[in-house]
Image (cartoon, helix red, strand yellow):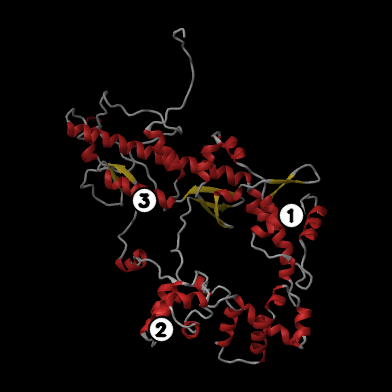
Amino acid sequence: MKQGLELKLGQHLAMTPQLQQAIRLLQLSTVDLQQEIQSMLESNPLLDEDAGEEGTGSGAVEPGTVMDQDRQIDLSADTPLPEELPLDSQWDDVFDLGLPATAAVPDEDLPDFESRNSSPQSLQDYLRWQADMTHFTSSERNIAEVIIDSIDERGYLGTDLGEMATLLDVGEEQIRAVLQQIQQFDPPGVAARDLSECLALQLQLLADSDASAALALRIVREHLPTLGRHDYARLCQVLGVDETALRPALALIASLNPKPGENIGGESTEYVIPDVIVRRVGTRLRVELNPEAMPRLRINRHYADMAGGKDATHKYIQDHLNEARWFIKSLQSRQETVLKVANAIVERQKDFFEHGPESMRPMVLRHIAEAVEMHESTVSRVTNQKYMITPRGLFEFKYFFSSHVSTDSGGSASATAIRALIIKFIQAEDPRHPLSDAEIAKILADQGVQIARRTVAKYREGENLPPASQRRHL
């Protein structure tokens, strides 16, 4: 093989640590970003949080002030701070990410420590606590423990009693006796083996049982499949009652909880902090960053003034000073980008804010990327887990992006707008004769939107709306 030298020219993006940091901060949610900022404050002594103190005992730079010429930080030629960021922006040592705190928060206003740090009580824990309050023998307590462990998150018993009896080497009647006691525990309907038994257990606990409760109990025990098909004529026939007597029984059944276990325990609450605020000012919509979402950060002057030397201590300070300034610059670039994308979204979806979801315009990442002159991947990171509080409610940025469906006029309609129309049609339908998916598709076609029946079904299911057969009421 002949050896030789070849010279090629090309371009590629160098993923410097600073660029990686800027990209990572860009895609974090506000809650995660606050944790990242707190971690940086704890690890970098050159970075301070401005809590709005009157004095400057730590020697920190005051927001908006400029240091004297003889007190400026010496950025030596050996370790210059680069001038580029993935997003072009102006910055300073002080970056105001939020409003200053004006006073200390009283202790009584802080959330309870245990409620913030303790795990939520599970359904099994709640049932075991009730079992401890019940007069079980040692053998019955063991059986109760196995039964409780076999209850799923919905509150249903998922193990066959025969299998449980074989496992514990006891009689099935013993298992059944303990099960009947557990079925009296809270929440009502827990430890049922199917939906019929779950609803029946709840009806049996009603203190003032009347004819309606007795009829409802008969329905859930004997005619639940007929009720599931909403075949009310057949129910009236087999029960020997008219619609007047059937209606209160059905209302009673509808008030029951088919999944009693879901109200106990579960995941801890996740809070959303909006990144931007959209306000109506006259006839215009104003988009601004949420001033309470971020703390105020600044460079610590006391330590920064020590960064001019050449020994190891001064190099340590210089490195952390550069890190702090890069972090502030990345944060500012993130906020500027979020605000720029939010403005572009609000500008394109003005009809939504004026008239609601039915007026949502089709929009994909490319539309916003072209408007803000950024790459689609950058817009995707910005819209991930970012929220805006608007006069119409709290929305994730991604909510405003949707595919399109062609119209007879040659234009397009947003999938979000079509979903809103489907909800509107269903809410206005006759409950005795609900609209089928084909009928909804025909109504949309009459309005110029060409959409298949299966697409209507997909959108309806996406909104957790049951089919026509299950929406039929008396």
Which residue is at a point 68% across and 65% down the rendered structure image?
466
- On screen, residue 388 versus residue 47, left or right, reads right
The image shows residue 383 at horizontal and vertical percentages of 53, 45
Give the foreground label among 1 and 2. 2
The 10 Å Cα crowd at callout 3, few under 14, some 14 to 19, many 20 or more, is few
Residue holding disc 3: 35
Kind of residue at badge 2: Glu
Identify the residue under disc 1. 454
Specify which label sits upstream in the sequence, 1 or 3.
Answer: 3
Residue 35, given in percent of the width and then of the height, sits at: 36, 51
Q: Please state if 165 lies on the left or on the right of 96 as rendered.
A: right
Q: Nearer the viewer, residue 440 or 190?
A: 190
**Residue 291 visible in the picture:** no
Front-most of residues 265 and 331: 265
Q: Which element carries disc 3, helix, strand or loop?
A: helix
Bin the neighbour count of mark 2 within 10 Å (Cα to Cα): few under 14, some 14-19, many 20 and up: some
Please identify the quarter of the rendering in which residue 299 is found: top left
Using the numbered discs, state the Cα–Cα distance from disc 1 to disc 3 in whole angstroms.
44 Å
Q: Which residue is mark 2?
A: 140
